[in-house]
Image (spheres, helix red, strand yellow):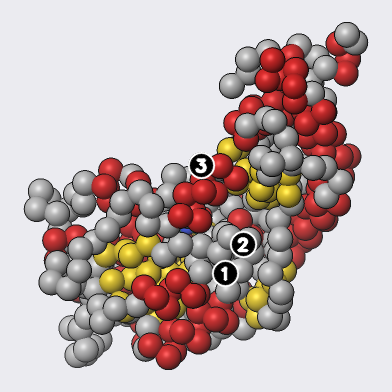
Amino acid sequence: MNKLNLPAILGGSPIRSIPLPRYNMIGAEEKAAVMDVLNSGELSGFVASSGPEFHGGEQVQALEKAFCEKFGSLHAISVNSATSGLHCALAAMGIGPGDEVLVPPYTMSASATTVLFTGAVPIFVDVEDSYFCIDPKRVEQAITARTKGIVAVNLFGQSANLNALRKIADEHNLFLVEDNAQAPGALHHEKFTGTIGDAGVFSFNRHKTMQSGEGGVVLTNDGDLALRMRLMRNHGEVVVGAMNISNIVNTVGLNYRMTEMEAAVARVQVSRLDALNAPRIALANRLTEGLQTLDGIMPPQIAEGNTHVYYFYPLLFDASQTALSREQFCKSVEAEGFTLRAGYVKPLYLEPLYQQKICFGREGFPFSANTANRDLVYEKGICPVVEDLAENRLMVTNITYPPLTISDMDDFVEACRRVLAHAEEIIDAGIT
Ligand SMILES: *Cc1c(COP(=O)(O)O)cnc(C)c1O
C-alpha cells in the first residue's frame, strides 16, 4: 500500500511534521508598558491600610478602569488570579458553613474549590448536552433551603444560559457568579459574559486569551460587593476598623494583589481583546465548515443569542458513524501532529477531595457542616450527561489560536478525514 496516504499512526508521514507554534500575543506595547513600570521602581502600589494605597498603584487602577469601560461595569477588582477572584466573589456574598452553592462539575477545579474555602459546599449540577454548561432546569431542581447561589462557568468560550440562570437566581433570591475565565468578550443576547452575574471573573493565566503571567479581574455593579472583594484582596481585617465598616461578614482578607507589571500587561491585553478573539473565531469557523463534511465527529453547537470566542474548540464523537473508539480516533489525529484530547477534565466530584470528603483538617469540614437536611452525594452517576461527555463523547482541541492559519485548520480536517477513512486498518493494527 502507498505509505504516503497511510495515517501517521500506521507509519505514514504525518500531515503536520513541525510542532504547532506557541500562542504569543505579547507585543511592543506590552513590553513598553512593563519597562515603564520597571523604570518607575514602584513594582506594586498596594498598602494594607485605609489610605488611598489600599486600592493599589497606577497600573492596577488603570487596568480596573479599562475593564469598566470595555465591559460597561461600575466596578472592576483586579486580583492575582481568577481563582483568587472567585474566592473574593464568593466570600463577598457572605456565605459560610452550612450553605450550598450550585456548580457544574465539568470545569477547572477552582470553580468549586473556592466555594469550599468559604466553608460552604458545592452541589454539582449536570450540564446541557449540547453546550456543556450548567443546565438551568437542573439548577431549579437542585435548589434547597440551604442554597445561596449559583456559579455558572462559560465553558470553552461560550456563554452558559445566563438569562435563564439570572431569572432563577432572582426568583429564588440567590447570587449568580460567572466564572468567565474561558470566555472573555463572548456575548449572550448582546451582553458581555461576565456582566450578567452579580460578579464575573476573568483570568490572565498562561493558557488564557488575555495573558499577564498570572492575574484576574472581577466585575460587578454592586458597590457593597466591590468593597468586600477589595477587603478580601488586601488584608481586610486590618482596615475594617479604620474604615468604620460595621456589617462585618467574611472580611478576613488575604493577599490577592496584582503587581504593577502584571497590570500593565493586562491593561494592554484588554485593549486588544477584540483583536485577540477575531482570529480565534475565524479559525474555528473554518474548522466547523470542514468538519461538517465528516461523519463521526460533530462540530460545536452555538446556543441562540450566543457568540463563541473559542478558548477551546470542543467536538463530539459519534460512535454510531465509525468503528473507531474515541480514544483510537484522538490518538490517531494526534499522530498527525495536532492536539486532540479525549474528554476535558474528570467530573470534579470524582476526585478524592469529594469522594473522601476531606478538605480542612480530619473531620471532613466543610462537608461535615452540611448534614442536617441531606446527605451530600458525590457518587458516580449524579451527573449522567457530564459523565457521558467525559467518558464517551467529548473531544477538545486548542488549535484555534494565532499564529495558526486557515490552512492549518484545513490540515486538521484532513487529518480527521484520513483517520476516519482508515478506521479498519487502525483497528486491525491493534491501536488502542
Ligand atoms: C483558568 C481557569 C480558572 C482559574 O484561573 P487562574 O487565573 O489560573 O486562577 C478558573 N476557572 C476556569 C473555568 C478556568 O478555565
Q: Height in image: 63 above or below 403?
A: below
- Disc ID at residue 131: 2
> In the image, which disc is placed on residue 91?
none
Choose between 245 and 296: the one closer to the eye: 296
Question: Mark 2 vs mark 1: which is more N-terminal?
Answer: 2
Residue 189 pos. (x, y %): 68, 80
The residue that label 1 is drawn on is 160
Q: CA distance from mark 3 to mark 2?
A: 17 Å
Q: Quadrant of the C terminus?
A: top right
Q: How many marks?
A: 3
Q: Which kind of residue does numbered mark 2 sit on?
A: Tyr
Q: Residue at x 51, y 48 (%)?
A: 388
- Percent x, y of residue 23: 68, 43
Q: Are marks 2 and 1 in contact (CB under 8 Å)?
A: yes
Left/right placement of residue 229 relative to residue 294 reads: left
Q: Looking at the rendered structure, which numbered label has been put on residue 391?
A: 3
Image point (45%, 71%), residue name: 138
